[in-house]
Amino acid sequence: MKSEIWHQNRPFVGNSRLEYRPRPVPHFNPDRIVITKGTLQSKNQYELVKAICSVYPEVQVIEKLDVPHNRILIDSSDSLVQHYQGKKTLVFGIHKSALRYSNEDRNTCPNYWHFSPYGFCPYDCQYCYLAGTPGVKYSPTVKIFLNLPEILNQIDKVASQLTEPTAFYLGKLQDGLALDPMTGYSRIMVEFFARQKQARLILLTKSANVENMLDLNHQGHTILSWSLNPPEICRAFEKNVPSCEERIAAIQKCLESGYPLRALIMPIIPVIGWQNMYANFLKNFLFTVPLERITLGQICSYAGALRLTERKLGKINPISDQIEKRKSRDGRFRFPLILRIEIYKHLIDTIRRFKPELQVSLCMEEYQTFKALNMESAIGYCNCVL
């Protein structure tokens, strides 16, 4: 099928009607769209693909219907070129194992259910840890998985066996809302979890794309969490990403719609003057939005991702200059323990000064960090779980 067919304005197929009209996505301008194996098995899938292609009428559409989504390669041997070309490549795919239970060990992560209606992310955070994970390194494309009903059925089967409220997390391997104007998936997911007795959705994002969710009857079963940093850090390390101010404005809209709200301050980057920078940001933010939980985290990345960071920022940069040269017990690279403790103590003291009752925890940290901060009781009460 020629690519021109996908750009024709034909929103109807037979008697089937596309219920959601895709819109262009801020901060994402793909150079090519690739349709992969298994994606055109239903009218709804066909319609959504066609409607999204129509939003980007100048973009080349390539059919690779015998190739799975995770085998779309970028034609370059340069890792940075692969990275950026991948972020300009939109892949439609089918993900048969989109629901998983995390298996972290040798750190304090409590492990949790997570699922993937998307893969990777169009944003360009200079520190991105996802860039170093095996799946992204091999096929660093932005993915939309078209079998969302099947994924939600998998969640429903697990949820039917639960005896207490349990989180299903969206944001481990992607941004939970970055592509939502294109897909409208949030409208389906929020209403799905609103009907669940025990399953709860926790969605992490840097996006400001919240319009699809504001009118939904979520029943308090969807918890929205934003990854944030002071505006100075966002401007320096988060390229092609909604600004800190845009994200906070989106949070305020969701507050008006009654969603439970959280924030993840991560990765905290100790640039010159970080103490005042983070204290001023937290003071203003905490008085702007009532949160139910705040989680703090620092760099905990892989060698491949850190190499890309150095390609973007240069070998001399605030992350590489301070990162330990040896891996932690869980295989990640972190700042030295003494520096991490200093940073956490400063931020926690700031939070306690302004919001003493706010629940605070740490993300992807080691036990000795919690112990040094007298926070052992906070282990397991972080962003991705209830």
Image (cartoon, rainbow, N blue to C red):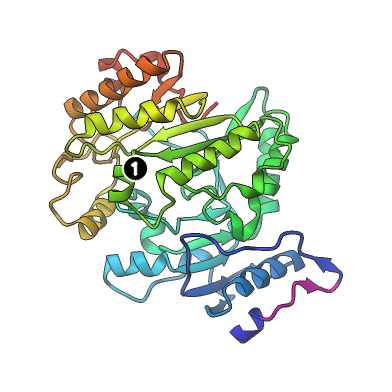
In terms of depth relative to the viewer, which is nearer, 282 or 226?
A: 282
Residue 48 drawn above or below residue 158: below
Q: Is 203 or 234 nearer to us in this picture?
A: 234
Q: Is residue 136 above or below residue 12?
A: above
Residue at 70% x, 63% y: name it. Answer: 21
Asked if residue 305 is positioned above or below residue 385 in the image, the reply reads: below
Q: Is residue 166 above or below residue 230?
A: above
Q: Position of residue 104 (x, y in %)?
A: 40, 35
Q: What's the residue at 54%, 80% (across, down)? A: 58
Q: How many marks?
A: 1
Residue 109 in view (yes/no): no
At which x and y percent is residue 278?
A: 29, 31
Instruction: Let me know if residue 296 appears in the view.
Output: yes
Task: Give the position of the N terminus as an image quadrant.
Answer: bottom right
Q: Position of residue 245 (x, y in %)?
A: 43, 43
Where residue 342 sits, quadrant-wise, is top left
Residue identified by numbered label 1: 231
92 or 210, which is in the foreground?
210
Please provide percent x and percent y for residue 89. Answer: 46, 69
Q: Is residue 13 magenta?
A: yes
- Point out the stretch of residues depicted in magenta: 8-14
